[in-house]
Image (cartoon, grey):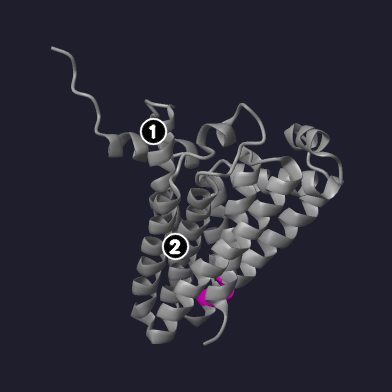
Amino acid sequence: MPAPSAPPWSDGLRFAFGTLTVFPVRVTRWDRDAARGGMLAAPLAGVAVGGCAALPGVLLLALGGGPLLAAVASVAVPAALTRGLHLDGLADTADGLGSGKPAEDALRIMKRSDIGPFGVVTLLLVLLAQVAAVARAYDDSWARGALTVVVAAAAARLALTLAARAGVPAARPEGLGAAVAGTVPVSGAVLAAAVVTAAAAAAGAALGPVGAVRAAAGVLLALAAAELLLRHCVRRFGGVTGDVFGGLAETAATVCAVVLALGR
């Protein structure tokens, strides 16, 4: 008797965790259906990464390490849990956009293993912004810091869900970008955005009404920033690539963390 096949949601979760994290999950299917489920499940992978990132931050804060050290730990963990792929994608995207070259040449620059000046400066500023924002949140309370880290990680992966929606083309015929581009129905992307925003608001409500509004605003403004970058990349490169997805994730995470760190 043949072994029973895994349910569709299981393939989607495997795809999300197997491609977006270093968690020991084996991806068993690489077809478009699995990619669709994986991109829809991407925010769940973000919650898992954010939860892992918040733990050392809260622990260091409890041990007297201070908000800055806690923030550095919470920013470092997502980089480690993604093998630095999103940061690498951000740097490559910055180099491609900053080159001013035609699409074909810009894509060639992005595929090179080295990082150019645009990539270095972008990485430095983004990481500084993330550490500063998370440190500000931890300085207020451990709960606000943890919330900032988790919501920012979820928003970062939600940006990937929206970037994989139908109508957004791939810039290359190969690679992860091509595998997931256009797989998510627009209705599914909108529903995912609504669910994640509502969940962020509910979590933020633990810190009061202002916390709820701030968390929801963080997700929405993160998506808006990622959408602006996505449209610019599509115009410049002719579509999305794996590097562009990484750049979108880091952009969304940074904007969300900054918004959640604002105010008292």
Residue 260: percent from left, percent from top: 52, 74
Residue under pointer 1: 33
Write down the quadrant of residue 135 in the picture: bottom right
Residue 256 x %, y %: 55, 67
Residue 171's disc number: none
Residue density around tag 1, few if under 14, some if 14–19, many if 20 or more, within 10 Å: some
Residue situated in front as seen by the camera: 50 or 231: 231
Total numbered badges shown on the rendered structure = 2
**Residue 137 highlighted magenta (yes or no):** yes
Q: Earlier in the sequence, mark 1 or mark 2?
A: 1
Q: Residue at x 54, y 38 (%)?
A: 181
Q: Residues within 10 Å of mark 2 (few under 14, many from 20)?
A: many
Q: Is residue 187 above or below residue 177?
A: below
- Please state the extent of the stretch shown in magenta in the rendering: 134-138
Give the labeled residue for mark 2: 150
Q: Mark 1 and mark 2 in contact? Answer it, CB < 8 Å.
A: no
Q: Nearer the viewer, mark 1 or mark 2?
A: 1
